[in-house]
Image: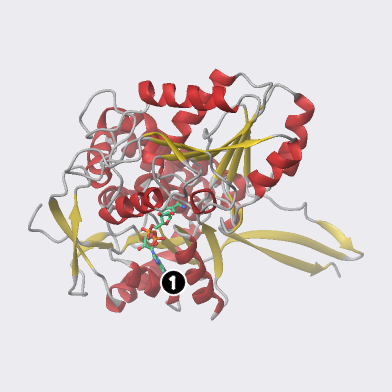
Amino acid sequence: MATTTLQNHIGGSLRNAHGTGTLDLIDPATEEVYGRIPLSDAHDLDAAYAAAVSAFPIWRERTPAERQLALFRIADAMASRAEEFADLESQDTGKPRATLVADEIEQSIDQLRFFAGAARSLEGRAAGEYAAGHTSYVRREPIGVIGQVTPWNYPLNMAVWKIAPALAAGNTVVLKPAESTPLSTLLLAEIVAEHTPAGTLNVVLGGRETGAALVAHPVPQMVAITGSVRAGMAVAASAASDLKRVHLELGGKAPAVVFDDASIQKAVDAIVTAAFFNAGQDCTAATRVIAHSSVHDEVVRALVARTKTHARTGAPHEDGVLFGPLSSAAQLAQVQGFIDRLPAHATIETGGRRQGEKGYFFEPTIISGMRQDDEAVQNEIFGPVLTVQSFDTDDEALTMANGVRYALAASIFTRDHTRAMRFTRDLDFGCVWVNTHIPFVSDMPHGGFKHSGYGKDLSQYGFDDYTRVKHVMTALD
Ligand code: NAD
């Protein structure tokens, strides 16, 4: 692998990229180069979009039952090649290999199966005579060709979140995976090509410039990205110039509010896993504990104790590891930068340093004494770093929780039902958990408000986002 440059998957087969530049793939656990991707250019995107345009009328004509069957077969193939997917994903990301199938591959399989079902349950108003002498009905149609861009934190999951609803609804796709994590998406493309018309899914490799060109291309009717706020804003601005539909999932800064009536141990157990899983490189990760002043010290002590016993980082093939290295040198530098710039009033309770000298490992880190306007409270660190703040009143807790530009996910820990109901209403986030943090299901929507973007992934809402609604009205005489 060390000397080969990966190929794009266009029109049902692998093709050398026309773009001549390349980018090394660097193993985040060892810092060794293990491959190269091409930096695809406008010719590559023209070819991929041409393939998607040719495939669209064929794929759209398939009945929902036929599309469902194709997605089931793709899910079955993923299940039978789960270990292979896990090997590729672990190579690209450094995730713990032993738990990868259960933690991530099985979710992708379930999501494919969910959207296979969604293909057969199109929603709309009943046909009827809404004006005298006229029958109206609604057609729910695919949008057309979709351009999609995925990130490096959950490469396969994010590809499936994007591809499955789009294909289920009858669209065709050109997708660019993140530059550092292409392998699982290429295997997915190979499998999809075995069960769909050539060109239904096309995968083009490259970096930000390729992504920007994919979005700016005149063919797609809609563009979808999961990534940074910066990238999302660039995509929305580009798409505005020719009014493409936009679907954005741009990260978060999830609060976990712990009230004095909560079961502190249960809250802490949930928060530690949710903070450090995937090295905190998760847009729904618990990042900000907001604890009632009467339990604050107990919460900090319990968080530190639980972190020391349950949040070990280590190499992909080590036993008993919760999370692997950060994804890249840039990500390590970003996390270290936040720690280096901590204000004097902050206390590092545990962690705070790179672990080892090779690989982008960072210790699980808990910082107390934080204030609302500290940058580590306001900005996405996207690393294994948890901050803790203290509050006295419910209103104060709400103001702190909502007081960031992100609005993807939040959690509260309380046994008081009325308080829980009030907070689920008043927390300004796309997902609110009560007495848990981070689980999600294929059947329920995932997506944020404010700078976390707009549009839903997963669920029937995610499916609907990849359809358009047409009203047909017929005079009866
Ligand atoms: P990024 O947003 O630059 O990369 C994500 C994907 O978008 C990649 O495939 C990239 O090539 C592509 N991309 C970047 N700019 C683009 C543009 N203008 N047009 C089209 N595609 C573009 O993310 P990053 O710089 O690698 O990471 C920086 C930060 O982004 C992270 O620290 C984290 O805060 C955030 N992030 C969030 C998520 C998430 O799940 N929401 C995922 C990855 C990164």
- Which residue sits at x=41%, y=35%? 276
Q: Residue furthest front?
A: 344
Judging from the image, what secondary structure is the residue with disc 1 in? helix
Quarter of the picture holding the C terminus: bottom right
Quadrant in the picture for residue 323: top left
Quadrant in the picture for residue 459: top right
| Residue 339 point in image, percent of width and height | 39, 48
| Residue 62 point in image, percent of width and height | 48, 55
What colour scheme has been applied to the protein in the rendered image? secondary structure
Quadrant in the picture for residue 255: top right
Q: Is mark 1 within 8 Å of ligand 1?
A: yes
Q: Which one is nearer the viewer's eye here, 222 or 345? A: 345
Q: Residue furthest right?
A: 132
- Which residue sits at x=33%, y=76%? 46
Q: Say what amino acid the circle numbered 1 marks.
A: Val
| Residue 131 point in image, percent of width and height | 89, 65
Q: Which one is nearer the viewer's eye here, 347 or 366? A: 347
Q: How many marks?
A: 1
| Residue 305 point in image, percent of width and height | 42, 21
Is there any visible trace of residue 455 in the rendered image?
A: yes
Q: Which one is nearer the viewer's eye here, 37 or 401? A: 401
- Which residue sits at x=30%, y=66%? 207
Answer with left or right where residue 255 lies relative to residue 428: left
Image height of 320 relative to 37, above or below: above
Tell me if mark 1 has few (under 14), some (14-19) or many (20+) residues whose alpha carbon lies within 10 angstroms of its own: many
Q: Residue furthest left?
A: 3
Image height of 47 relative to 169, above or below: below
Is there any visible trace of residue 146 in the rendered image?
A: no
Q: Which residue is mark 1?
A: 215
Ligand 1, seen in the image, is in the quarter at: bottom left
